Image (spheres, rainbow, N blue to C red):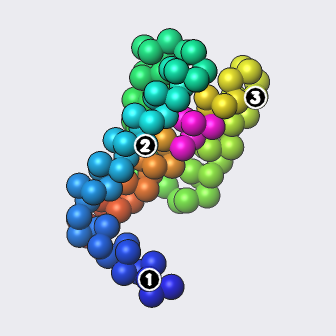
Amino acid sequence: MEKIKQLTKQLTEKPVVVLAAFVVVALAMILISILALHLPVVAVCTIVILEALLAACLNRIPIWVHGLIVIAEIVAGIVFGKIVFMVLMAVVYVTAVTLLYLWSRRAN
């Protein structure tokens, strides 16, 4: 527990590291979606931007609502036959929420 608090403190002191991690995760998910799933570049990048905007708009809601959003994304992936893609986008969403959480903790 002490190590988690120490790591959180280090990450809140250096939010640029967390931002860089988000960029790396987003680029990895984009490349996987384009190269492995053969999806159009514009569509993938648009969804990644929408995921980041959704996380920014819902920044101050309780954590369980974010869980419902991730579940809804996966269900949408099942309905539309793109479950792997939506799981990748759920990873982008969770990473964006984590970035915003750590970024806002630094501001407080």
The residue depicted at 44 percent of the width and 83 percent of the height is: 3
The residue depicted at 68 percent of the width and 43 percent of the height is: 71
Closer to the camera, 54 or 28? 28
Q: Secondary structure at mark 2?
A: helix
Q: Within the image, what quadrant is residue 86 found in? A: top right
The residue depicted at 42 percent of the width and 23 percent of the height is: 45
The residue depicted at 52 percent of the width and 21 percent of the height is: 35
**Disc 1: CA contacts within 10 A as few (<14), some (14-19) or many (>=20):** few
The tag earlier along the polypeptide, 1 or 3, is: 1
The tag earlier along the polypeptide, 2 or 1, is: 1
Q: Dot 3 corresponds to which residue?
A: 78
Question: For this view, does 18 lie left or right of residue 25?
Answer: left
Residue 11 percent across, percent down from the top left: 31, 67
Q: Which mark is residue 25?
A: 2
How far apart are labels 1 and 3 at the CA level? Answer: 38 Å
**Disc 3: CA contacts within 10 A as few (<14), some (14-19) or many (>=20):** some
Q: Where are the magenta residues, as a range?
A: 87-91
Looking at the image, is mark 1 or mark 3 nearer the viewer? 1
The tag earlier along the polypeptide, 2 or 3, is: 2
Q: Secondary structure at mark 1?
A: helix
The kind of residue on which mark 3 rests is Ile
Looking at the image, is mark 2 or mark 3 nearer the viewer? 2
- Whether residue 88 appears in this view of the structure is yes
The kind of residue on which mark 2 rests is Val
Q: Is residue 107 above or below residue 23?
A: below
Residue 10 percent across, percent down from the top left: 29, 73
How far apart are labels 2 and 1 at the CA level? Answer: 24 Å
Q: Residue at the bottom extreme?
A: 2
